[in-house]
Image: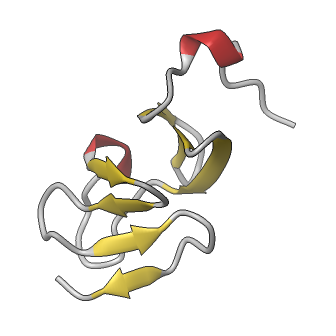
Amino acid sequence: MIPVCHLDDLPEGESVRLSTEPPIAVFRTEGALYAIDDTCTHQDASLSEGWLEGCFVECPLHTALFDLRTGQPACPP
């Protein structure tokens, strides 16, 4: 287990990036926590800096969507 932060320090709709290898993004949305690989599969972009909408995060560079429940791309860039 890797401590990330106190739950109160991660508001609903926000994310935090862990500088692990590989980097991990932790999101708090819809009352749940999700952890996925922080790097976009298309190019080296941090998903923790993307736009969160429900259980999907949009890559800040390519507009590709990733499902936080599976970590898989939901659509190509």
Horizontal side of 18 relative to 33 (left or right) equals left
How are the residues colored? Answer: secondary structure
Residue 71 higher or lower than 2, as above or below: below
Residue 22 higher or lower than 3, as above or below: below
Q: State the residue at coordinates (25%, 57%).
A: 45
Q: Quadrant of residue 41?
A: bottom left
Q: Quadrant of residue 1?
A: top right
Horizontal side of 13 relative to 50 (left or right) equals right
Which of 74 and 29 lies nearest the eye of the viewer? 29
Horizontal side of 47 relative to 63 (left or right) equals right
Q: Residue furthest right?
A: 1
Which x, y percent locates residue 73? Answer: 41, 81
Q: How many marks do you count on the picture?
A: 0
Q: State the residue at coordinates (64%, 39%).
A: 31
Which x, y percent locates residue 72? Answer: 50, 80
Q: State the residue at coordinates (62%, 67%).
A: 69
Which x, y percent locates residue 33? Answer: 66, 43
